[in-house]
Structures are given as structure tokens and as C-alpha cells.
Image (cartoon, rainbow, N blue to C red):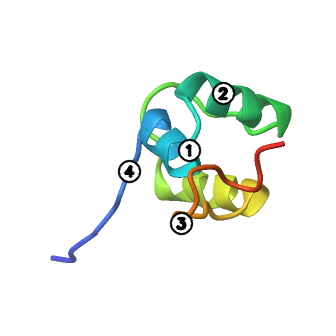
Amino acid sequence: MENHNVVVKTKQQMADEYGVCRKTFTKLLIRKRIKLGRGLIYPKEQQLIYSVLGKPDFGNEYSSCIP
């Protein structure tokens, strides 16, 4: 049996990574035309978000991708 180490996240967790509130994060996704359903964000969707918005800068409170 394989060990699948899948890390799923909520919108709140991803918003926290970018240093914004969940509503702002959702608006940013809409502006960038990234459509997510309700519920958890799986790794494939996370990679899409990171490729469009850039990886969050964990050293700063706010990410440089947020206009």
C-alpha cells in the first residue's frame, strides 16, 4: 500500500499564507479568474493558485502579488 501524503487546505489557510483575509483572497481569485468550488483546496488547485499568484512570501506579512 502506498503512502499518499496529500495536503489539502481551506481558503482560510491559503489566505493566511498570503497575509489577507478569506474574503480578500476569494476576491483575488475571482479577479485572476481562478474558479474553485466549495470545500477543500487540493494540491492540483493549490499549484494553479501558486502559479498564477506566485508563492507566498512567508517572511513578510503581505505578499507582493496582492495589488
Side of 66 relative to 21 (left or right)? right
Q: Does label 1 or label 4 sit earlier along the sequence?
A: 4
- For label 3, count other residues whose C-alpha is less than 10 Å away and answer few (under 14), some (14-19) or many (20+): few
Q: Does label 2 or label 3 sit earlier along the sequence?
A: 2
What is the three-letter code of the residue carrying label 2?
Thr
Position in image of residue 43 (x %, y %): 49, 58
What is the three-letter code of the residue carrying label 1?
Gly
Q: CA distance from mark 1 to mark 4?
A: 19 Å
Front tag of 2 and 4: 2
Q: CA distance from mark 2 to mark 3?
A: 20 Å
Side of 14 relative to 9 (left or right)? right
Q: CA distance from mark 3 to mark 4?
A: 22 Å
Q: CA distance from mark 2 to mark 1?
A: 10 Å
In the rendered view, would you say 3 is above or below 65?
Answer: below
Residue labelled with disc 3: 59
Residue labelled with disc 1: 19
Residue labelled with disc 4: 8
Q: Secondary structure at mark 1?
A: loop
> Where the N terminus falls, by quadrant?
bottom left
Q: Does label 2 or label 1 sit earlier along the sequence?
A: 1
Residue labelled with disc 2: 24
Residue at 77 percent across and 53 percent down: it is 65
Side of 25 relative to 14 (left or right)? right
Position in image of residue 49 (x %, y %): 67, 52
Mark count: 4
Residue at 84 percent across and 32 percent down: it is 31
Front tag of 2 and 3: 3
In the rendered view, would you say 57 is above or below 27?
Answer: below
Position in image of residue 21 (x %, y %): 55, 29
In the rendered view, would you say 64 is above or below 32?
Answer: below
